[in-house]
């Protein structure tokens, strides 16, 4: 396991928990934190004993965005030359389901990190925003694309052009957040949810994630065809036999994740 300084990595049964841990900077995403989050996701994703991942921050801030102090002096040729922020794409390539457990500020890169996860469970104190416009830039980790897909053009334009924050009720109504829970219960609910996911057949959860994500990248007809082919392939797994046998025998399935 890698040593981490700006995140904490725990394993809780079949769930991997990544906690952003730069409290003095409200979890501002500097290059070290970014490297560590990507490395932790890759490590957990490669571990067949892990069936779901939770990424969380502190009560005050999931993350207040990319580290403005680190980023401010960058030149165009540095940003372009190093393909600044492209490493974050590795999070969306993870096959294991990832839940963002968001409390407090999820701004700029913080909102984008939450949207790189598969869904967001938020506390009643969560605030989401893409305030980059106020800094003279635009989102750079997919905010203009993923926010638009999540909440539609009108709200995404409003957020990206004014830089205003959404409170959690607005975010839930708009479809950015799957559930709102009291702040004191956020981590427990996220871990319980992740444990539920991790108790399902791992091949089936990976296939379900891939199928839902395909909906954003293809036509309806192609997406339905993709889903059907993947559905057919579940009949090659031991877990399909076990899941259906367990239903018929009125018992809890014992998935082998194979
Ligand atoms: C990835 C891209 C391309 O999409 C771009 C981005 O993500 S750009 C960044 C977008 N985020 C922001 O613009 C939010 C910046 N932060 C704030 O507006 C405020 O900090 C706040 C509203 C979230 C919270 O305000 P407050 O409670 O008053 O706390 P502060 O005193 O402002 O902050 C405490 C401490 O944290 C540092 N901090 C906060 N955010 C960042 C950040 N994004 N980068 C670097 N540092 C940040 C802040 O400077 C304070 O530290 P000190 O200066 O006191 O040492």
Image (cartoon, rainbow, N blue to C red):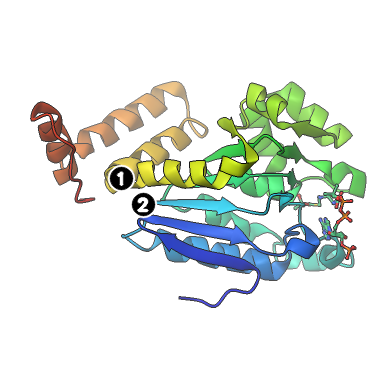
Q: Horizontal and vertical percent for residue 185?
A: 56, 41
Residue at disc 1, secondary structure: helix
Q: Residue 252: percent from the left, percent from the top?
A: 18, 37
Q: Are marks 1 and 2 in contact (CB under 8 Å)?
A: yes
- Horizontal side of 31 relative to 7 (left or right) equals right
Q: Which residue position holds label 2?
A: 51
Give SS at disc 2. Answer: loop
Binning the other alpha carbons within 10 Å of mark 1 as few (below 14), some (14 to 19) or many (20 upward) gives many
State which quadrant residue 145 falls in.
top right
Counting residues from the start of the chain, the first of labels 1 and 2 encountered is 2
Can you say whether 129 is above or below 110 in the image? above
Visible residue check, residue 184: yes
Q: Residue drawn at (79%, 29%), measured in percent from left and top?
A: 157
Is residue 78 rendered to the left or right of residue 40? right
Q: Mark 1 points at which residue?
A: 199
Residue found 54% across the figure and 54% down from its top: 91
Q: Distance between the residues labelled 1 and 2?
A: 7 Å
Q: In this view, does 52 lie to the left or right of 231?
A: right
Q: Which residue is drawn at 72% across and 52% down?
A: 63
- Residue 126 drawn at (x, y percent): 70, 39
Of 171 and 85, the residue lying toward us: 171
- Give residue 41's mark: none
x%, y% of residue 143?
A: 70, 42
User: Depth check: 149 or 189 in front?
Assistant: 189
Quarter holding the N terminus?
A: bottom left
Q: Where ligand 1 lies, by image quadrant?
A: bottom right
């Amino acid at each position: 396991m890698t040593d981490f300084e700006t995140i904490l990595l725990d394993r809780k049964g079949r769930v991997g928990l990544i906690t952003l841990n730069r409290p003095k900077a409200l979890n501002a995403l500097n290059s070290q934190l970014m490297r560590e989050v990507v490395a932790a996701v890759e490590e957990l994703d490669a571990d067949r004993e892990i069936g779901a991942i939770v990424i969380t921050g502190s009560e005050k801030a999931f993350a207040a965005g990319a580290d403005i102090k680190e980023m401010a002096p960058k030149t165009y040729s540095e940003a372009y030359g190093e393909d600044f922020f492209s490493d974050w794409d590795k999070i969306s390539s993870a096959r294991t389901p990832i839940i963002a457990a968001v409390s407090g500020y999820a701004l700029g890169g913080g909102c984008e990190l939450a949207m790189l996860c598969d869904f967001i469970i938020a506390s009643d104190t969560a605030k989401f925003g893409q305030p980059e416009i106020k800094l003279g830039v635009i989102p750079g980790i997919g905010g203009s694309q993923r926010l638009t897909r999540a909440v539609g053009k009108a709200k995404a334009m409003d957020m990206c052009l004014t830089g205003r924050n959404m409170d959690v009720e607005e975010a839930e109504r708009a479809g950015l957040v799957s559930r709102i829970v009291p702040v004191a219960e956020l981590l427990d609910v996220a871990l319980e949810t992740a444990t539920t996911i991790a108790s399902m057949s791992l091949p089936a959860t990976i296939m379900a994630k891939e199928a839902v994500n395909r909906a954003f990248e293809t036509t309806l007809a192609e997406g339905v065809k993709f889903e059907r082919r993947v559905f057919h392939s579940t009949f090659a797994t031991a877990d399909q036999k076990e899941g259906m046998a367990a239903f018929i025998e009125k018992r809890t399935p014992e998935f082998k994740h194979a």
